[in-house]
Amino acid sequence: MSSGVKLPKLPFPLRDYQKEGVEFLTSNNAALLGDDMGLGKTVQVIVALKKLFYANGVKRTLIIVPNSLTSNWVNEFSTWYSDLPIGTLIGNKESRENTLKHSSSTIIATYEQIRIIFETSRDIGEFEYVIFDEAQRLKNSNSNIFQACKKIESNNIWMLSGTPLENNSNDIISLFSILKYGILQRGYTPREIKEIISPYLLRRLKKDLLEELPDLLEENKYIDLSEKQLAFYNALIERKFELDKKDSSGMLALITELKKVCNFDPISETSSKLEYLKEIVEDTFNNSEKIIVFSQYVETLKFIERNLNTNTLLYDGSLSKKQRDLVVDKFQNSKESEVLLASLQAGGVGLNLQAASRVVIFDRWWNPAVEKQAIARAHRMGNKNKVHAIKFVSAGTIEERILDLLHYKEDLFEEIIEGAVELKDKASLAELLEIKE
């Protein structure tokens, strides 16, 4: 694999460590990019593909991702490599299999889709490049997903994982049995494993790149709704046809319900956002860091609290001043209190939470200034850590529509106050319900 190709023009400059990552990928037909979460592994892969494809032409490529991250990959491609045709596996079984086996460009598929296709056809096909995102999904060599992915034929395999070794050395052995079959065997010592895999692994930590990273790293993370969330969401959307566009009160109530189901399905309590948050929390713990999760809904914070399976602190408007001070003190000073769940209304202003290096905006607020104020609780004088702010966006929903409108209707969001219905342009609420197909 050649690496002496000139990098094509990019919409934004890469940081030095990202350039190194691109060079690593383009120079290796078997590569595990093990960077910390938040260092831009997806961007490095897309730019590496762009570099190779501009030099040699577009190749048949398969990118396998978790269910919730399909839209995030599509959005990143639209930013960094907009002229590359991207396909996803949609439609019935025959349509999905036809796309997978006959597409000549780049396909994004989920692990579950690959498993189902393999179980029915026993054949995935051959690709010139195969990329596994969140490759730790392959750590269990006995799983059906592992067996399906192992059968994919390719001369160029890249893996992405911020946690390539979660439990023991068997995790990395399983990954390399797909990435570079035969170089690792069970029974090798950790030192032997490290030496063998070192040519194929690039691992960078945020703490080692502090001078390279900006003081504040912000990103929108696009997450797909789970099947049950999507079914509930679509049922709610049907109600918009019963509303008068001038009924701003009814529309605002419907929009609020839609925003809530983007957080979790109230019946099954399934949540794609929660599943991704669990990965962030695990990564945060592994780096001995602390995290604040903001939501505008207390019921969402309580949902997270009972499902996160870790020690959490809850900060909302129901607490007395003394109780609030106690929660803040525990978060700032106790090693056991690594996750603070805070309501935007109660915790978005007036707090100093310099112990946190991660901030998650779990759901989107009408006014981006409120989100900035929330992030500023951690990103302030006295914080010795760089701050990584991750804003969740449920792809193809009201949340994505809100972001779209922010670009050209900032005045709308300045006028909307949660619970208020007075707007200069009441039809603007109806526009929010015009969700992109």
Image: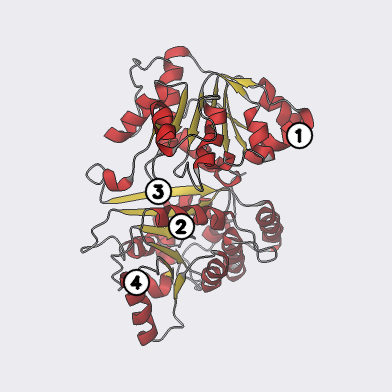
Earlier-in-chain disc, 4 versus 1: 1
Foreground pick, 35 / 234: 35
SS assignment at label 1: helix
The three-letter code of the residue at mark 1 reads Glu
Where residue 274 sits in the image (x, y, percent)?
A: 55, 58
Foreground pick, 368 / 326: 326
Earlier-in-chain disc, 2 versus 4: 2
Quarter of the figure with the N terminus: top left
Q: Nearer the viewer, mark 4 or mark 1?
A: 4
Pointer 3 residue: 219
Q: Residue 119: which disc? A: 1
Q: Nearer the viewer, mark 4 or mark 3?
A: 4
The three-letter code of the residue at mark 3 reads Glu
The three-letter code of the residue at mark 2 reads Val
Residue at image coords 57%, 42% = 137
Q: CA distance from mark 4 to mark 1?
A: 49 Å
Q: Residue 281: which disc? A: 2
Q: CA distance from mark 1 to mark 3?
A: 36 Å
Pointer 4 residue: 334
Residue 429 drawn above or below residue 164:
below
Q: CA distance from mark 1 to mark 2?
A: 33 Å
SS assignment at label 3: strand
One can see residue 134 in this view? no
SS assignment at label 2: helix
Q: CA distance from mark 4 to mark 3?
A: 28 Å
